[in-house]
Image (tube, coloured by chain):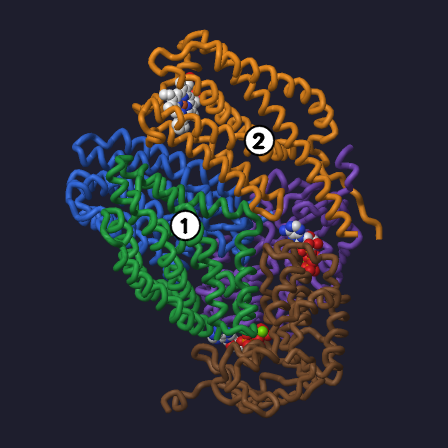
Chain colours: A green, B blue, C brown, D purple, E orange
Amino acid sequence: MNAALRLFRHDISLQLRNGSDLVAPIAFFVLATLMIPLGVGPEPNLLTRLAPGMIWVTALLATLLALDRMFLRDFEDGTLDLLALAPLPLELAVIAKVAAHWVTTGLPVMIVAPLLGVMMRLDAHGFLALEISLALGTPALSVIGAFGAAVTLGARRGGALLAVLVLPLYIPILIFATSAVSAAGEGLSPQPHLLLLAAFFVAGIALVPFAAAAALRNALE
Amino acid sequence: MNAALRLFRHDISLQLRNGSDLVAPIAFFVLATLMIPLGVGPEPNLLTRLAPGMIWVTALLATLLALDRMFLRDFEDGTLDLLALAPLPLELAVIAKVAAHWVTTGLPVMIVAPLLGVMMRLDAHGFLALEISLALGTPALSVIGAFGAAVTLGARRGGALLAVLVLPLYIPILIFATSAVSAAGEGLSPQPHLLLLAAFFVAGIALVPFAAAAALRNALE
Amino acid sequence: MTSGAAHRFAGVGLACRRSERLVFAGLDFAVEAGEALLLTGPNGSGKSSLLRLLAGLIKPYMGRLEYDGTPLRDDPARQRDVVVYLGHQDAIKPMLTVAETVRFWAGMRNQAERADAALAAMDLTALGDLAGRFLSSGQRRRTALARVIASGAPIWLLDEPTVGLDAQSIVRLEAVLASHRADGGIVIAATHAPIALPGAATLNLTAYDARFSDEADAA
Amino acid sequence: MTSGAAHRFAGVGLACRRSERLVFAGLDFAVEAGEALLLTGPNGSGKSSLLRLLAGLIKPYMGRLEYDGTPLRDDPARQRDVVVYLGHQDAIKPMLTVAETVRFWAGMRNQAERADAALAAMDLTALGDLAGRFLSSGQRRRTALARVIASGAPIWLLDEPTVGLDAQSIVRLEAVLASHRADGGIVIAATHAPIALPGAATLNLTAYDARFSDEADAA
Amino acid sequence: MTTARVPLLHRYANPAAFGRLAGRIMPWSAGATVILLALGIYFALFDSPPDYQQGDSVRIMYVHVPAAILSELVYGAMALAAAAGIIWKHALADLFVKAAAPLGAIFTLICLVAGSLWGKPMWGAWWVWDARLTSELVLFFLYLGYIALVDAFDDPQRGLRAGSILVLVGVVDLPVIKFSVDWWNTLHQPASLITLSGPKIYASMMVPLTLMILGFIAFFVTVVILRLESELLARRIRAWRTAAADE
Ligand code: HEM
Ligand SMILES: Nc1ncnc2c1ncn2[C@@H]1O[C@H](COP(=O)(O)OP(=O)(O)OP(=O)(O)O)[C@@H](O)[C@H]1O
Ligand SMILES: Nc1ncnc2c1ncn2[C@@H]1O[C@H](COP(=O)(O)OP(=O)(O)OP(=O)(O)O)[C@@H](O)[C@H]1O
Ligand SMILES: [Mg+2]
Ligand SMILES: [Mg+2]
C-alpha cells in the first residue's frame, strides 16, 4: 500500500515538477471547449443544449491524450520491468498509475468544468449533475483507458483491439453522463443515469486493474 | 526528394503495423460526432445548422490525438538523430512525417466525413464545400501540429502542453472552414472562405516546416 | 526478507520460450549463499532471457525455480522480495535526478535509508542533483547499479552490468559485488566483457541450445 | 560523395556546451584518410558530446570543424554526406525487421545495394527477417553497425560500437573497420572496452576539461 | 589536471554593459511611469467628457485601449527579440522575450477584462464570439503557451530557444487582431485611433488616452529592465552552482 502511494506520488511528480505544469492541462480544456462556439456559432440556447455532450467529449479527449503515455514510456525504458518485480502487486501499481493519470487529467477537468459550463451557457441546474457525473465518469474513463493502453503494449494489432475492447466501454459512460447532465438541465432527475454511472465506476475500479495487470505481464514476457 | 518519399512510406508502414495510432483518431472522431445528436436531440434542422461546425471541431480535436507521437518515439529511440543527419534536409523530413500523419488522420476523416454529414443532416449543398475545406484544412492542421510536437520535444507535460500551443493556431482554420461549409449550406458561395483557407494551407506548408525543423534541431542539441 | 543472507537458489530442467522460439531447454543450475554465477554465450544464446526468467518476468516454459528447496512458482511475492534485476535498459526518467531515482526505487522496497550509501558506492554523490536527461551513458548505468545496490535484495541478477562503465567504475562495481557476496548475497551476471568475480561458476548457454520439433509441437 | 575516399577531417579550438555546462574547450584534432582516432576518458568526460558535435548534431560553442580545409559550418549538407553516426541508442523499430531497417537507412543515402553486404558483414543474414522487437541486445547493436557499414560515408563516428557484442562479432567489426580504413575511410570511435584499431591516435578528453567561469559572466 | 575557464556569455552581449545602460534608463522610465499615469488617470476620471451615448462607462476606454495596444506592442517586441536571438544567438534577446512575456500576458488580460466590463453595458453581454475578441483571446493563450513552454524544460537554454520559435510562429495573430475589425463585420469598434486618416476622436479624449498609453509603455520598460536584471543574476548563480558541483 505504502509502495503504491510512493508510485502514485512518483508518477504525479513526473508530470508536474512544479505548479506551472498544471497550467497546460487546464488551459487545454478551456481551449478545446472554446473550439465549439467558434465552430457552431455563439447562440446561447444552442450551446446550452450542446454543453453536456461537448464538455464530456473534451474530457474523453483529455483522457485519451495522456493515455498511451501511461505505460508506453515505462515499457520502452524498462521501468515496467522494475514495477512488475517491485514488492507491490502489479494490480496495485496499475491502480496507482490510474490514480496519477486521473489527477493530472480528470481532476483538472472537474476543476474547470464549471467555468466551461458558464462559457457554454450550461443550464444552472446542470452544474451539480455535471460535477457528479465527472467525479464518477472520468475515473472510469481513466481505468478503462489504462486497460486499453496495457493491451496495446503487447499485441501486435493493438490498435484494433483497442477499438474492439475499449471504445464499447467508453460509449455507455459518455451516454449516461451526458443524459444525466441534460436531464438535470431540463429539470428532470439525473439520479437514474448517475446510478448507472456509479455502477460502471465501481465495476471498473474493481475489475479492470486485474485485466490490465494481466495484459502488462503478457507484454513483458 | 526520393529520400523524403522513402521516409514517408516508412512512416506509413510503421503506423499501419501497430495500428493503435491509426484507430484512436478515427474512433474518437466518430464517437465525438455521435455524441452530438445525443446532446441536442434529433431535430433535423438544428442538426443541419450544427453539422459543419461539429464535424470540423471533432475532426480538429481528433488530429490532436496522434500528434505527440509524431516525433516523440523517434526522439527517444535515437531515430531522430539519424534523420537529422540523413542527406535530406530536416525540413523535407518534417514534410514527409506530416504527410504520413495526414494520411493516417486527416484522410480517414475526409473519408468518413460525408457519412457523418448524412447522419447530421448536413445540407446537400454543404458536402462538396465540406470535403474541399477538409482537403485544405486538415493538412494545415497536421503541419501546425507537427510544429507543436517538435517544439514540445523534451518538455514535461508533452500532451496537454502541445495541445495548448496548437489549438490557438487552429482557430483561424476552424473559422474559415466552418463559415465556408455553412455558407454553401445556405446557398451562398463558399469561395472567399475557401480561398482564405487555401492561403492558410499554402502558407502553412511553405513556412511551418522550417519552424518545426528548427525546433527539432534545438531538441537534439 | 531484507537481510543480505540468501540460502540456495536453483533451477531444474528450465526451458525458455520467446514467442514461437525455444531459446534453451534442460538447463539446471544451483547457487549457494555467497556464490556467483557467470552466464556466457554468443549474442542471442539466451543470457538475457534466462535472467528475465530467473527474475520472474518470463514464466518457465518447462522446469521450475527453487529457493531453499521451495518452488517459487507457488510464491511469486517471495520471488519479488529476494530478487533484484538489472536489465539492458536503465529505466532512467529524463526529468528525475539521480538521487530521486535511486531513492524512489529503494523506497519501493522500504530501503530508503540505503540510497545514499548506494549512491556513494557508485561515486554518484556529486551527480545526485543531475537530471536523468543530462546523464552520460556510464552515469546512467551507474545510477541503475546504485538502484540494485540499494534494493537490499539477496539475489542480484545483472545483465551486462559493466556496459558503458569506465575502468574506475568497474573496479568499484567489483568491490561492491565482492562485499555483497561476503554478506551471503548471490550474484548472477551475464557479460561479454571480462569482470572479476573470484570463484564464480560459469554457465555457457550454448550448451542448452534447443529448437521446437514439429512432433513436439503437434504432441 | 559515396566514395570511401576521405581526405582530411579536422577540428580547431572546439568547445562544447551542454545546457549550462561547458564539457570541453580548446580541443584540436586532425585525422587523415585511412587514419583512426580513439576517444578515451572517464564517464562524463565528453566523448559522446564530441561525437555528436563532429556529426553536426551539436553546434560548436567555440571553434570550427574543417573537411579538406573548408569549414563545415558553411556547408552542413556536405557534413551530412561525409559523416555517419552511431550513438548509444540503436534506433531499432520494434515493428521493422533487421533487413528492413538496414535497407531503409541505406536507401536514405541511395546506397540500397550496399545493405545485403553490410548485413553479411555483421553476420545478420540469417536474422534478416527477425523483427526488432525480438532482437537481443547484441543483435540490435550489430544491426545498428550494419546501418553504418551500408551508409557508404567516408567518416564513421562510433560511440562505444562494441557494447553488447560477443567476442566473434568484435573480431568481425575490427575487420570491417580495417577494410574501411584501407579504402581511405576515417574512423573516430569512443570506447571503454579495448578494441583493435592498429595505429590509431588516442585523444583523452580529460585533457580538455573546462568550466564556465563565474566572474567572467560579469565582465 | 588543469581546468580551462571560459566566460559564460562569451561573444554574446556583455551583461556589464547592459547593467550600466539599465542603470541609466531606470530612474527616468520609473519617474515617467508615475507622472504619466498620475496625469492620465486624473484627466481620464475628472477632466474628460462622458461620451454622449456611452455615458461614464466610456472611461473604461482609458484602461482598455492602452492595455490592448500594449498587448500587441509587447508581442511585436518579443517577436523581434526572438528573431534576433535565433539569428545572432544574442543571449540577452532570448532573455528579453522571457522577461516580457508575463507583462504582455497581464496587459492582454487587462484588455480582456476591461473589454468585457465595457461590453456588458454596450453590447449587453460579457462576451461575444467576435473576431477581434477571439483573436485577442488567442493572443492571451499564446502568451500563456510561451510561459508554460519555456519552463517546461529542465534545460533553460533549450526552453528559451523553443519559446522564441513559438513566438515567431504566433506572430500571425497580430495582423488578425489589428484588421479583424475590417475583415469581418464585428460588434467591436473599428480603428479610430491609429488610422491612415489620422485620429477620429475628440482631443479631450485623445489627451488622457495618449498619456495613459505612454504611461503603460514607461511602466513596461521599467519592469522589463528589472526582470532582465534578475534573470541575469539567476543565470550567474546557476552557472556558479554547476561549476561548484563539478569541482
Ligand atoms: C473582451 C472584450 C474586448 C476585447 C478583447 C477588445 C480588444 C481590443 C483590442 C485588441 C483593441 C486594440 C485594437 C488596435 O490595436 O487597433 C481594442 C481597441 C478598442 N476597443 Fe476593444 N475590446 C473589447 C471590448 C470593447 C468594448 C465593449 C468596447 C466599446 C464598446 C471597445 C472599444 C474599443 C475601442 C474604442 C478601441 C480603440 C480602437 C482603435 O483606436 O483602434 N472594446 N479592443
Ligand atoms: N521478445 C522476444 N520474442 C521472441 N524472441 C525473442 C525475444 N527476445 C529475444 N528473443 C530471441 O531469443 C534469443 C535470446 O535472446 P537474449 O536476449 O536472451 O540473448 P542474449 O544471450 O541476451 O544475447 P546478447 O548477448 O546479445 O544480449 C535471441 O535469438 C532473440 O532473437
Ligand atoms: N543534454 C545534456 N545537457 C546537459 N549536460 C549534458 C547533456 N548530456 C550530457 N551532459 C553532460 O555532459 C557531460 C559529458 O557527457 P557525455 O555523454 O559526452 O560523456 P561521455 O564521455 O560520453 O561519458 P560516457 O563514457 O559515460 O558515455 C556529462 O557530465 C553530462 O552530465
Ligand atoms: Mg542480452
Ligand atoms: Mg558516451
Residue A163, x across and y down, in percent:
32, 62
Residue E66, x across and y down, in percent:
49, 21
Question: Residue A47 got which mark?
Answer: none
Examine the rendered structure and indicate whether residue D179 appears above or below residue C199: above
Secondary structure at badge 1 equals helix
Q: Quadrant of ligand 1?
A: top left
Instruction: Between label 1 and label 2, give the one nearer the viewer.
Output: 1
Residue D29, x across and y down, in percent:
74, 49
Q: Residue at x 32, y 40 (%)?
A: A120
* Label 2 Cα crowd, 10 Å radius (few <14 / some 14-19 / many 20+): many
What chain letter is assigned to the residue under label 1? A
Residue E162, x across and y down, in percent:
55, 41
- State which quadrant residue D143 falls in: bottom right
Residue type indicated by callout 2: Ala
Which residue is label 1 attached to?
A109
Q: Residue at x 60, y 19 (%)?
A: E33
Q: Does the rendering let one see residue C80? A: yes
Q: Residue at x 56, y 17 (%)?
A: E37
Residue type indicated by callout 1: Val
Q: Nearer the viewer, residue D6 or C70?
A: C70
Question: Residue E100 got which mark?
Answer: 2
